[in-house]
Image: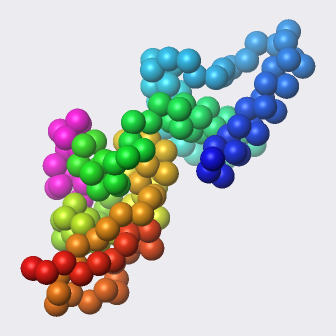
């Protein structure tokens, strides 16, 4: 079980104890039990992240929603066997997003997007964060090892992601 799952389970055990302790108090958020509730929580989280309110209450609400969403993602992700680039292609296809749209979303060059989509460059931490937020999936979905395709004349430096395994492929 990954560290994220252990942290989420620990947080949920604490949350469960708090629920029992404050049974009389109505909770603003509960453990996600449906796709509809999941989407509502994702939308709420996005709104909270978009506002400029930096209060402790707002940070706590963001943390709680993040835990609840990550817990749902961990149990309902069908992406466990798909490498990050395959996943990105699938999500782009589902949302009818083209490479030029990714350039705008990620704020990077079209060359970098092309290299990522063709396994020539790895995903940076910042790109992983933006993709996870854009597609409403956990960062772990994009932060897994996969193989880069590097031509025989290419240099191995500058690939961007330590999780991308670098190999030579004859071109």
The picture quadrant where one finds residue 69 is: top right
Q: Is residue 122 left or right of residue 137?
A: left
**Looking at the picture, how far across and down is residue 77, in whole percent?**
44, 36
Which residue corresponds to the image point at 28% horizontal and 42% vertical from the top-left?
A: 91
Query: Is 113 left or right of 107, judged from the image as shown?
Result: left
Q: Residue 85 in the image: x percent, y percent?
A: 29, 56
Q: Residue pushed farthest top?
A: 24
The number of numbered discs placed on residues in the rendered structure image is 0
Q: Is residue 91 left or right of residue 165?
A: left
Q: Quadrant of the C terminus?
A: bottom left
Quadrant position of residue 109: bottom left
- Magenta span: predominant SS is helix
Query: Is 136 situated left or right of 27 in this image?
Result: left
Please check the rendered image and state whether residue 96 is part of the magenta-colored stretch, yes or no.
yes
**Extreme left residue here?**
171
Residue 63 vertical position relative to residue 36 in the rendered view, above or below: below
Residue at the spot 50% in from the left edge and 35% down from the top edge: 73
123 is within the stretch colored magenta: no
Give the percent coordinates (x, y) of residue 169.
19, 78
Q: Is residue 40 visible?
A: no
Please, is residue 68 above or below residue 83 in the view? above
Q: What residue is at 39 percent from the left and 36 percent from the top?
A: 78
Position above or below: 12 against 164: above
Is residue 41 shown to the viewer in this render? Answer: yes
Residue depicted at x 66% and y 52%: 3
**Residue 108, image x, y percentages:** 29, 66
Q: Which residues are magenta?
A: 92-103
Scheme of colours in the image: rainbow
Q: Which of 136/86 is in front? A: 86
Kindly indicate the quadrant of the structure image that contains residue 126: bottom left
């Amino acid at each position: 079980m990954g560290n994220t799952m252990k942290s989420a389970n620990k947080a949920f055990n604490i949350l469960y104890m708090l629920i029992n302790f404050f049974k009389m108090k109505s909770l603003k958020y509960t453990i996600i039990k449906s796709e509809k509730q999941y989407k509502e929580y994702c939308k709420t989280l996005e709104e909270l992240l978009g506002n400029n309110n930096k209060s402790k209450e707002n940070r706590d609400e963001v943390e709680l929603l993040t835990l609840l969403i990550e817990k749902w993602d961990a149990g309902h992700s069908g992406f466990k066997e798909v490498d990050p680039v395959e996943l990105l292609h699938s999500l782009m296809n589902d949302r009818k997003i083209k490479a030029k749209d990714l350039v705008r979303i990620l704020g990077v060059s079209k060359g970098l997007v092309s290299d990522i989509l063709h396994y020539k460059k790895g995903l940076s931490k910042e790109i992983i964060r933006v993709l996870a937020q854009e597609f409403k999936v956990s960062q772990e979905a994009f932060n897994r090892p996969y193989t880069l395709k590097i031509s025989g004349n290419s240099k191995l430096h500058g690939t961007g992601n330590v999780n991308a395994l670098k190999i030579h492929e004859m071109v």
